[in-house]
């Protein structure tokens, strides 16, 4: 299988790197494109990824075309490649924020198999959470999309109407978790650790928390109960955070982010 990724921004490049790092025998070639020319000093991109500035030429032999461009670039990109996609019946996978299956069909055709995927930049380290939806023509290709993105983390099929919310939780969610880790790091520094020590403590504790929940499949409160004792330091800290609006602030932030993403022009 040959894959072309159109758009070498943060997400497109992360997907390319992730596929390169974790690809299986079913993936033969990865190509990534952008308008600006690639330069030799860009050593971040390994040699097994083909770099191109020509979208049409890049997709010529591709089985899968991943669109990872900005929302306002979709129209131009679709006009460039639509004729070839229709002729070759190539699978389109879109990671474009706010662009629904219907909008993608309007730019291509209902006859084109279209998969909409919402991953996050953790694809580059094989730990993304990717939500997937498809049009009618793409239903038989969902397994192919799941195979690609399962190499890069976990996947979940959802209705297309839930993809805006998925963008907030999974895509924007990376930034929200980074801010929580940063805050924990700052607190650790104030308590006397060096910045390097503080970051190590914060990141590893976050990883451990996530792994505990992932393996136990239990509710977070069950894990919290295991580390809280009557009149102890943990419950005192938790209550102080809640008094200052920790959970409320997070939920409000998610809801505002969801409101904002729905303002993106959907045409």
Image (tube, rainbow, N blue to C red):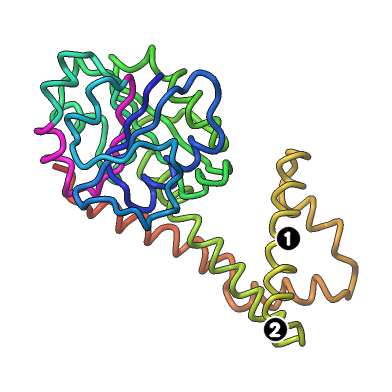
Q: Pointer 2: what residue? A: 189
Q: Pointer 1: what residue? A: 204
Where is residue 81? Give x, y as percent.
Answer: 15, 29
Q: Secondary structure at mark 2?
A: helix
**How many badges with numbers are in the image?**
2
Q: Is residue 211 above or below residue 173?
A: above
Q: Quadrant of residue 114?
A: top left
Q: Is residue 230 above or below residue 31?
A: below
Residue at 48% x, 38% y: name it: 130
Where is residue 77? Give x, y as percent.
Answer: 15, 38
Q: Quadrant of residue 225?
A: bottom right
Position of the C terminus by quadrant: top left
Position of the N terminus by quadrant: top left
Q: Secondary structure at mark 1?
A: helix
View extreme (front): residue: 40
Q: Which residues are magenta?
A: 63-80
Q: Quadrant of residue 41?
A: bottom left
């Amino acid at each position: 299988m040959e894959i072309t990724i159109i758009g070498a921004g943060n997400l497109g490049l992360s997907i390319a790197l992730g596929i390169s790092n974790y690809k299986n025998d079913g993936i033969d070639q990865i190509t990534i494109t952008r308008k600006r020319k690639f330069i030799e000093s860009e050593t971040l991109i390994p040699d097994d990824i083909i770099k191109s500035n020509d979208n049409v030429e890049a997709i010529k032999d591709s089985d899968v075309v991943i669109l990872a461009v900005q929302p306002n670039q979709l129209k131009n990109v679709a006009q460039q490649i639509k004729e070839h996609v229709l002729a070759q019946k190539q699978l389109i996978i879109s990671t474009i924020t706010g662009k629904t299956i219907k909008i993608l069909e309007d730019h291509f055709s209902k006859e084109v198999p279209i998969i909409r995927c919402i991953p996050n930049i953790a694809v580059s380290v094989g730990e993304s959470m990717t939500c997937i939806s498809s049009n009618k023509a793409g239903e038989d290709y969902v397994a192919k999309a799941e195979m690609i993105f399962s190499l890069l983390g976990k996947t979940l099929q959802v209705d297309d109407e839930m993809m805006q919310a998925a963008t907030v939780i999974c895509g924007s969610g990376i930034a929200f978790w980074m801010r929580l880790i940063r805050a924990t790091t700052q607190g650790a520094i104030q308590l006397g650790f060096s910045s390097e020590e503080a970051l190590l403590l914060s990141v590893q504790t976050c990883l451990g928390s996530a792994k505990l929940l992932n393996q136990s499949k239990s509710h977070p409160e069950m894990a919290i109960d295991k580390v809280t004792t009557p009149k102890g330091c943990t419950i005192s800290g938790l209550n102080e955070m809640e008094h200052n609006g920790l959970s409320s602030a997070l939920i409000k932030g998610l809801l505002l982010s969801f409101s904002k993403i729905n303002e993106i022009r959907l045409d």
